[in-house]
Image: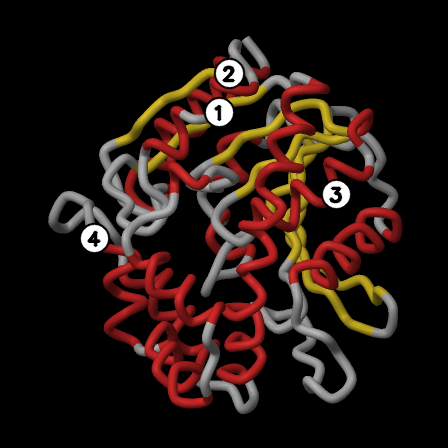
Amino acid sequence: MRYQYATVKGTKIFYRECGSLNKPVMVLFHGFPSSSHMFRDLMPMLAYDFHLIAPDYPGFGQSDMPSRERFSYTFDHLAEIMEAFLQTVGVKDFYMYVFDYGAPVGFRIAMKYPQRIMGIISQNGNVYEEGLGKKWEARAEYWEHPTKELRENYKSAFAPETIIGQYTYGTEEGSVSPDGYSLDIFYTQREGYDEAQSDLIFDYQNNVKLYPKFQAYLREYQPRLLAVWGKNDPSFIYPGAEAFRKDVPKAVIHPVNSGHFALESCCKEIAEWIRKVFVI
């Protein structure tokens, strides 16, 4: 494993990389409130078959967290930075692994460069209304009627107990190491983090509005697709995995007995399914 930085449009982007340069590239797009650290166990398991690259978005992990005065925290902008990052590190054709926030980032890039996408692994990376859990109803009301008070209320997403719940809900007792959520909690304590992330929570509405375009991309290009899903995730619920078959009839759908951060407890199973669908 190599730990490196690339400067992209004036922003320092951290990324981890492993595997042979002669193997197909897989780019792994992380979710909230995590970073490329979430792939720490998966990447070595796939290193024989892929050249793996996992960046941290601006404002996440070890990448720069520019001030809101000079950086727009929207998903359009994160995708733009990730697109430029791929160009900077010389990635053209690639498989992409998308999780949570990684889905709207990755699918924006896929729509723009459909011929470069060799295949998609969606692990609780939702692009369907069927996959939105109950909490999104309240967020939709917030998007329609935003107030300063509601913006403050949604900062509860950064509370330690919320993050621990994201990691442990729907998992077998004792199956999730505290390392992942402890690191995420550490990152949330940085100055300016709450306001930047609150911008992204509000902007998530634009991802939902893009769902029909993401689905149209899938219908037109029929990428090889594996939806491997923590079936007990209350945020992006399992019907979101099954919905992929509406647009990609040959999609492989596999539930794992976990929650949102399924890699924390089912990493080996997920790695085996990735190899089964894209290698073997």
Pointer 3 local density, CA inside 10 Å: few below 14, some 14–19, many at least 20: some
Q: Which residue is mark 2?
A: 251
Pointer 1 local density, CA inside 10 Å: few below 14, some 14–19, many at least 20: many
Q: Which residue is mark 1?
A: 244
Cα separation, mark 1 vs mark 3, equals 18 Å
Does 42 appear above or below 143? Answer: above
Q: Which residue is mark 3?
A: 109
On screen, residue 92 versus residue 165, left or right, reads: right
Cα separation, mark 2 vs mark 4, equals 27 Å
Secondary structure beneath dot 4 equals: loop
Using the rendered image of the protein, determine whether residue 1 is visible from the camera's viewpoint.
no
Secondary structure beneath dot 2 equals: loop
Q: Which residue is mark 4?
A: 169
Which quarter of the figure has residue 247?
A: top right
Q: Amino acid at mark 4?
A: Tyr
Query: If you read the primary sequence from the N terminus, does the residue marked by circle 2 or circle 3 appear first?
Result: 3
Asked if the residue at tag 2 contacts the one at tag 1, i.e. Cβ–Cβ closer than 8 Å, the answer is yes
Residue 8 image position (x, y, % from top left): 84, 64
On screen, residue 250 versus residue 133, left or right, reads: right
Query: If you read the primary sequence from the N terminus, does the residue marked by circle 4 or circle 1 appear first?
Result: 4
Q: Amino acid at mark 1?
A: Phe
Cα separation, mark 1 vs mark 2, equals 7 Å
Q: Amino acid at mark 3?
A: Ile
